Amino acid sequence: MARWTLKSTYYWQQTFAAQQELVIDHRYVPSVGSLGRDRARQDWAKEGDVESRYLRRYCPSPKLLAGIEKATRAAKEAQAIAFSEQRIEYILKTGANWDGPIKDFTLTVDKGDAKNVISFCGDDVKKISPTQFQWHATDFTPTQDLYVLILTKPPS
């Protein structure tokens, strides 16, 4: 298993015309980190309580937590891996540095496969397709970064 970390940061300078309204539409496909559950637990254990950290970062529902626990127990009995995780981290707090709130904020997240499970924090997140979820907010001032957790089952 690789014992290295890759972090990429992209930035650019932009000049905006004074006294003019501007619409910014920012779209891209982020890179996705991936770890097996046991490796993720070891990785996160270095930074404190693993379970509470998952709860804070990914806001899983009680139903999702129960499903994960059930799949983990079944996999353990079968001496198999219940799932692997993919993580996406996006620095969102910098949006709070703009001149006022983001007037019309829309985030669309695609979990890749309908069988995958996804969790992230957001108010009134709506499922818009078998794999896509959307979060919309008006006059939005980001107070925390965005963390997305995608759980994938290993091939049978």
Image (cartoon, helix red, strand yellow):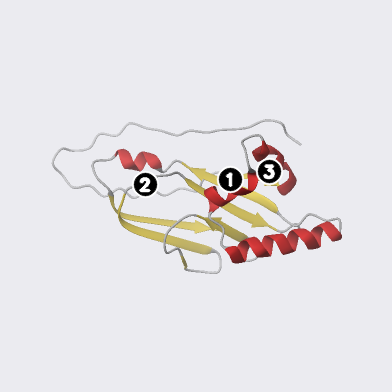
Q: Which amino acid type is shown beneath numbered disc 2? A: Pro
Q: Viewed as shown, does residue 89 lie left or right of 79?
A: left
Q: Residue furthest left?
A: 19
As measured in the structure, the alpha-carbon distance from the residue carrying label 3 to the one carrying label 1 is 12 Å
Left or right of 30 in this view: 116? right
Q: Which residue occupies the foreground of this view, 62 or 87?
A: 62
Q: From the image, tell me which residue sits under label 3.
A: 40
Residue for badge 1:
53
Quadrant of the image occupied by residue 50: top right
Of mark 3 and mark 2, the one earlier in the sequence is 3
Q: Amino acid at mark 3?
A: Ala
Cα gap from disc 3 to disc 2, whole angstroms: 27 Å
Give the quadrant of the C terminus: bottom right
Q: In the rendered view, would you say 46 is above or below 103? A: above
Looking at the image, do the residues carrying marks 2 and 1 touch, with CB atoms under 8 Å apart? no
Q: Position of residue 2 (x, y in %)?
A: 73, 34
